[in-house]
Image (cartoon, coloured by chain):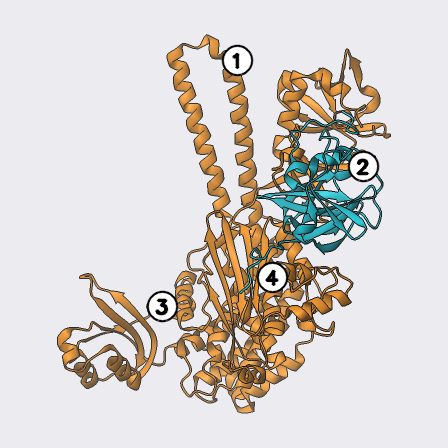
Chain colours: A orange, B cyan
Amino acid sequence: MQDGPSDGDSMFSDFLDDYFAECDEHLMGVRRLLLALEVSVGRAAINRTVLDELFRHFHSLKGISGMVELRAAEDLAHGMEEYLRVLRQGDATLTAEGVDTLFDGTQMLEQVIGARRSGAVSPSVDPVARRIARLVGPSATGASRAPSAADPASLSRPVPRWRCTFAPSADLVARGVRVDTVRKRLSSAGEILEAVPRVTADGAIAFEFVLAAELDDVVSAAWRADGIAIESIVDEAPPEEVPPAARESAGAAESELAPSGSVAPSHFVRVDLTRLDELMRNVGDLVISRARLTDTLSRVEQRIPAGDWRAIQENAIAIDRQLRTLREGIMRVRLVPVGEIFRRMPFVVRDLARETGKRVRLELRGQSTEIDKFLIERMMDPVLHLVRNAVSHGIETVEERLAAGKRPEGTIVLSAATAGDLVRIDISDDGRGIDPDAVVARARAAGLSVPPGTPDAATLLSLICAPGFSTRDESDRASGRGVGMSVVQSAIEGLSGSMWLETEKGTGTRFGVELPVTIAIADALIAKVGTETFAVPQGSIREVVEVPVATLLQVERNEVVPHRGAALPVLRLSRLFGLPETTRDRLHLFVVGVGGAAIGIAVDRIIGQREIVVRAIADSLVRVEGISGATDLGDGHVVLILDPAVLLRHMRERPDRIVTGRKGTA
Amino acid sequence: MMRADAVRGGDSYIVFTIAGTTYALPSGEVRHMEMIDDITRVPNAPSFIDGVVFSRGQVVPVVNLRARFGFERAAFDLRSRLIVVQTGSRLIGLVADAAREFVAIPPDLVQPPNEALAGMSGRYVEGIASMGDRLILILSLDRVLNFAEPLTVGTAE
C-alpha cells in the first residue's frame, strides 16, 4: 500500500515472507513429484515430465535461496538439481537409494528453511549433502558447473513432443486398430507423457496422447493413415519464463499419472487469513450500522407517508438479505480443500512404512472437499496421528499378512466427503483390526474402569481415547510422536466434531470423524468478574473504558458514571449474576448501545483478546438471558459468552431487576 | 463390522449412590462417566443446575441429583462422578456421590415402586430391584429430566 520509500528492515522481512511462501510451493511440488518418481526406480525410462518438473523446482529453490543468502539451502538444492541433471542425461539409473536420498535431502531442505523462518539454529546438512554428492559422482560434479550456468530449458526439451489424437471408429476397429494397439505403437516410438480421453464436438470419444519421440515422416504418415492425428507441440517460451499458472497446470497433468496425485492448486489466490478476518469484522460493523438504522427509522416511522415507508422497508429487507449473502460469501472464502491435510500423508506413510519394514499403499479420496481454514489447521495433527496409527498398529508386517492369506501390501484409505453442513473424514486400513481382549487387558492394567462383557466399538473407542491408554510400548515412537488418542479425541470434540470406530479383528479398522464445515468464529474480549471468566464479542462493543469505582454515582436504583459529558448507566455483571463484587478500586466498562441508549457493562477487569469458537447453548435448562453461547479458551473449561444486546435491552426494560439481582436465592 | 451405536446393553445398568441410597439407570442411556472436574456456573439457572461442561463438543448442563431429589448439596470428592446421559440428541450430566459399577439386573427381580415410597426421588423411580440384601431404585431418566414438574423441597426459589 505504501508508495514511498519504506523501512529497509520491513522490506526485507516482506521479501523473506515471499521467499518462505515460494519455498512452500516448490517444496510441495517436489514432494508430490518425488512420489511419482519413486515408481520409476530401476526403470530405464524415467517419466520425463516428472524429472523436468523436479529439476525446475530445485533450480528455483536454489536461485531464491541464493537471493536470501541461505547457503545451506542453496547448496542442497544445487546438489539435488545436479543429480537430476545426471539422470536426465541418462548418465545414471534411478536407484532406490537415489530416491531415498532425494527424500532425505528434501526433508533437510525443509528443515533448513524452517529453521531460518523460526530463527532457530539450522541443522547440519553435511551428511545429507555428502550422500547427494556421492550420487552425482565425481565426473558429473566436475562437469556440472559449466552446464549449470546454461539455460535449463535446453535440457527440458531434448525430444520433440507431439499431441496424437485417436478417435476409434467401427472400420478402424475392423482393421484391428484399437486404442490399445495405438498406445502400444506410440510407446514403441517414444514416451507417452499423458493419456487423456476426450469427448469430441460430435459426442464421440477420442484419446489424446502427449508423446515425446523423434518422429519421421514415414512413421507419421503411417499413423495418420490409421486415424491418428498428429500435431507438434511447441513450447512458446523457455520453461523459466513460463508463467507460474502454466507451470502449475503442467504439474496438475502430471499428478494424474502419479500414484497418489494430489489436488493441483491451479487457480488459487493466496490470501492472508487476517485479511479475511478483517473483512468479516467489517461485515460485523455493517450489521451493527444496519441495526442502528432500523432503530432510527422506527423512531421516525410516524412522520413518513405510508407509501414511502413501504419503500424504505423493502430496501431495508434487501440490505438485510445482501448482508447475509455477503457474510456467507466470506465464510465460503475461508473454505480450503481438505487436500491440504492429505498431501503430507503420503510422506508420513512412506517414511513410517520404511521404518517399520511394512508395505503400505495409501489411497486418497475426496481431497477437493472443502472445509474452513480454521479446521484444516486444527485437524492436521489428529489426522496425522490416525494415519500413523494405521501404519504402526493397523497394518501387519508382510509376513503376518501373507500368513493370514492377505496381499503383502496393506492399504490405508484416507477419504473426505461432505454431507450437508458436515464434512466426514475416514481413515481406514485393511490391517489386523483392534483386538478387544488386548484393549480390555491394557485398559485394566492402566486402571481404567471397563464394563463387563465383550466391549462394543463405542466402548473400545472410549477406552483407547482414555488418557493414559496406549496399546503399545511407550518405546513405539511412531505413534508416540505428537499426540495421543485422547488428544485426538479432544481436538475433534473441541471443533464440535465427533469420532467413531468400526473394527473387526483380522479385517481392518476404520476411524470416522465428522466435523461442521464451518464454525462460527468471533473476536472477543475476555473479562473476569469475581472468579468467573466471560467472553464478550468485540463486534458488539463500541468502546472500552476504565473508571474508578469511586466515580460511580447512585441515581435512584441505578448506578451511573459520567462519560463523554453524559451519565452512562452502569450494569454490574457481578450484581446481575450474583458474583462477588470487585475488591479493586477500578472497573472496566464495555460501552454498548448508541447515544442516550448506551450503557456500560461493568466487569472487574479485561484479561485479553481472543479469537473464539462460538458454540450454542442448546439446552433450555441453561439458556439464560444475557448469555449467548459458550466457548473453550483451550483448556477444556467452559467460558460463557455474553450477549451485550440482550443485556442492553434488559437494562432498558427492567433496570430495577438488575440492581436487585438474584443475590438472595442461593 | 461393529458400529458404535449398534450395541446397547439390555439389562445392564449403571449403579450409583446419592445420599446413601443406591440408584440405577439403564447403561444404554449413559454415554460415559467422568470425574467431576471443572463445572462452569451458569448465572440465574435453575437451582438444581450446577452449571455446564463440555462433552463431545457440546455444551452439557450439569444437574445435581442431590439438589434435584431434595437433599442438601455435598462437596465433591474423589468419588463424585458426572454421569453423562443421552436422551435423543440431548446430553445431560448428572452429578452423583459415587458411581462405579455396571450391574446386570434380571428383569424378574424388578418390582414396580411401592406407593408408599417416601421422599422426593420416589417420583422418578420406575422400579425397585432387590439384589441380595440391597435395594436398587431404577430411575426413569425421562422423569428425572422432566423439569416442567414443580420443584418443592430443597429447591430454594
For the image shown, how many numbered marks are present on the structure? 4
Q: Is residue A629 left or right of residue B70?
A: left
Which residue is label 4 attached to?
A: A457
**Secondary structure beneath label 4:** helix
Q: Are marks 1 and 4 in contact (CB under 8 Å)?
A: no
**Secondary structure beneath label 3:** loop
Badge 2 crowding class, 10 Å Cα cut-off, few under 14, some 14 to 19, many 20 or more, is few
Q: Which of A167 and A442 lies nearest the eye of the viewer?
A: A442
Under mark 2, the amino acid is Thr
Single out the mark in the foreground, 1 or 4: 4
Label 3 vs label 1: CA separation? 67 Å
Label 2 vs label 3: CA separation? 68 Å
Under mark 1, the amino acid is Arg
Chain letter of disc 3 in the image: A
State which tag comes first along the sequence, 2 or 3: 3
Badge 4 crowding class, 10 Å Cα cut-off, few under 14, some 14 to 19, many 20 or more, is many
Which residue is label 1 attached to?
A: A299
Under mark 4, the amino acid is Ala
Quarter the N terminus of chain A occupies: top right
Q: Are marks 2 and 3 in contact (CB under 8 Å)?
A: no
* Residue B28: image location, x then y, percent: 63, 51
User: Is there one chain holding both mark 4 and mark 2?
Assistant: yes
Label 1 vs label 4: CA separation? 61 Å
Quarter the C terminus of chain A occupies: top right
State which tag comes first along the sequence, 3 or 1: 3
* Residue A190: image location, x then y, percent: 31, 83
* Residue B145: image location, x then y, percent: 66, 37
Label 4 vs label 2: CA separation? 40 Å
Which residue is label 3 attached to?
A: A237
User: Is there one chain holding both mark 3 and mark 4?
Assistant: yes
